[in-house]
Amino acid sequence: MPRIYITSVFVGDQQKALAFYTDVLGFQKKMEIPLGEHAWLTVVSKEDPDGPQLLLEPDQHPAVGPYKEALAADGIPCASFAVDDLAAEHERLLGLGVRFTQDPLDMGTVKMAVLDDTFGNLIQLVELVE
């Protein structure tokens, strides 16, 4: 049965993205393999370092710009990350200057918010409510 190994977000500057995804969102770097001008650069959750990886993929392909712009224009997140306490994470990230396009919203079985990762991607944060 398949399982998620790597998924990706497209970024214009891998090193700036690494700083945002580690220093701000709290992931840790897993792999950095130089590939010419770019790298195979992944981050993982500190709580699950052997779990799924997020590839900070260069956005050089011509289709990426229109794809990212269309998703952002429609308010569609390109990724969704789980958090234990959405309210606390929202406050922590606001304190670090993160811009949210959707403040926390209680949907009954989930709470969610959407942030701008500064690279043209909307990222959804989700707290599952039991």
Image: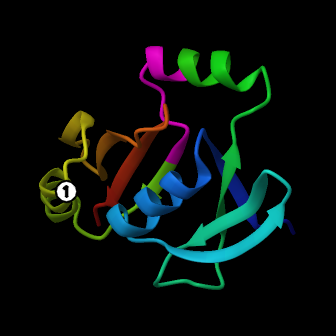
Looking at the image, is 43 positioned above or below residue 38?
Answer: below
- Image quarter (top left, top right, bottom left or bottom right) of the C terminus: bottom left
Residue 1 location (% of width, % of height):
87, 69
Segment colored magenta: 71-79
Looking at the image, is 31 positioned above or below residue 126?
Answer: below
Q: In this view of the protein, which residue sits in the foreground, 38 or 120? A: 38
Residue 126 location (% of width, % of height):
36, 54
Say whether residue 77 is visible.
Answer: yes
Looking at the image, is 66 positioned above or below residue 45?
Answer: above
Q: In this view of the protein, which residue sits in the foreground, 79 or 14? A: 14
Q: Is residue 78 magenta?
A: yes
Q: Residue at x 33, y 40 (%)?
A: 114
Residue 53 location (% of width, % of height):
66, 68
Q: How is the image coloured?
A: rainbow
For label 1, count other residues whose C-alpha is less than 10 Å away and answer few (under 14), some (14-19) or many (20+): few
Q: Residue furthest front?
A: 37
Say whether residue 4 is visible.
Answer: no
Q: Secondary structure at mark 1?
A: loop
Residue occupied by mark 1: 96
| Amino acid at the residue labelled 1 | Leu
Q: Is residue 65 left or right of residue 91?
A: right
Q: Is residue 44 left or right of residue 108?
A: right
Q: Is residue 72 magenta?
A: yes
Q: Residue at x 48, y 35 (%)?
A: 77
Q: Residue at x 56, y 57 (%)?
A: 15
Residue 51 location (% of width, % of height):
64, 78
Looking at the image, is 83 positioned above or below residue 66?
Answer: below
Q: Residue at x 58, y 45 (%)?
A: 13
